[in-house]
Amino acid sequence: MKKLLLFVSILILAAFTALCTAAAEDAVSSATLSVNALPQVQENENASVLVVYFSTDDTIRAAALTAADALSADVFEIVPTEPYTADDLNYNKTGTRATVEQRDSGARPGIAVLPESLEQYGTILLGYPIWWGQAPKIIYTFLESVDVSGKTIIPFCTSASSSVGSSDTNLHALADDTVNWLPAKRISNRETAEGIRAWALSMDLPVKEESHLLYIKIGDVALTSTLTDNSSAAALVDLLRQGDVTIDMHDYGNFEKVGELPVTLPTNDEDISTEAGDLILYLGHRFVIYYDHNSWDFTRLGKINDVMQAELKAILGEGDVTVVLSLEE
């Protein structure tokens, strides 16, 4: 199982806003999208899609993370060896770094870290801002530094007014004949998160759902459980992405420990006969760990892995117990 080493760095950059005439090309400072929050994209070891992007502000970053979240894709941010300053990005000055690079056909800005391997990915979404009608030259550096043979590449860009133009064609020229290069998508000014998600899903790319493990810490003991594939477990994962959840649980009926969740989750009730290790959602807001049998209409959340009934009862104890739920060990 292959994993991509993801380096997502926070670039402390000031975005420069330029006043452009209708005929002028877009400045380095790209349009702001109507995306209220950046999704917290988790690495998916089963992902077949990778979203690669370069951004000097949150414009392309927001588009890239939103698309990756919709596709359960992995993300790789192209981080320059030498970060761009606000003055570097001032297109009103003819001698600024970005201006000089864009006018130099041989310019290849350095990249701090390249991905270890792209082997597991069949499709790459490649995101960039429009700089003087073209992709930034660091995108050229990336394509010339990694092996994209046999992959499908889907470019996407943002700009305040400029079209994709020849940026797509010029990048395509760097790929060999085995690459399936699809037409670029321009994400327009003030595009919403819903619009970006709809575009990403409209391509009907193969989406491999992320496989989540739930870690349950009870005192010094850490248990691993596999979550069920339903909306209830997915909502629990979304909750845990915000941070660990601590639950004070008490014994009920000599067959379960039950405690209150901080939020109400969607239910998928069915007639269930529980076994030791079953994780159950009751009434949408009660988290239950079963250590013995019971039958009722419940929502199944998952099951604790590799633990015997007697062992689980000993770990849970006879009285109250505090558990911590987490997506990480």
Image: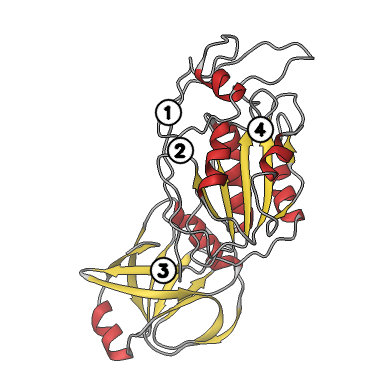
Which residue in the structure is indicated by mark 2? 79
**Residue for point 74% across, 32% down:** 188
Q: Earlier in the sequence, mark 1 or mark 3?
A: 1
Tag shown at residue 34: 4
**Circles 1 and 2: CB atoms closer than 8 Å:** yes
Say which of 226 and 105 sits in front.
105
Tag shown at residue 214: 3
Three-letter residue code for mark 3 = Leu
SS at badge 3: strand
**Residue for point 44% across, 48% down:** 114
How much space separates mark 1 and mark 2, taking CA atoms? Answer: 8 Å
Rendered location of residue 90, percent (x, y): 55, 14
Q: Earlier in the sequence, mark 4 or mark 3?
A: 4
Say which of 49 and 252 sits in front.
49
Q: Is residue 248 above or below residue 26?
A: below
Three-letter residue code for mark 4 = Ser
Q: Is residue 156 above or below residue 47?
A: above
Neighbor class of circle 3 (other Cα within 10 Å; few <14, some 14-19, many 20+) is many
Q: Nearer the viewer, mark 3 or mark 2?
A: 2
Which residue in the structure is indicated by mark 1? 83
Tag shown at residue 100: none
Q: Note whether residue 263 is visible.
A: no
Q: Is residue 320 left or right of residue 280?
A: left
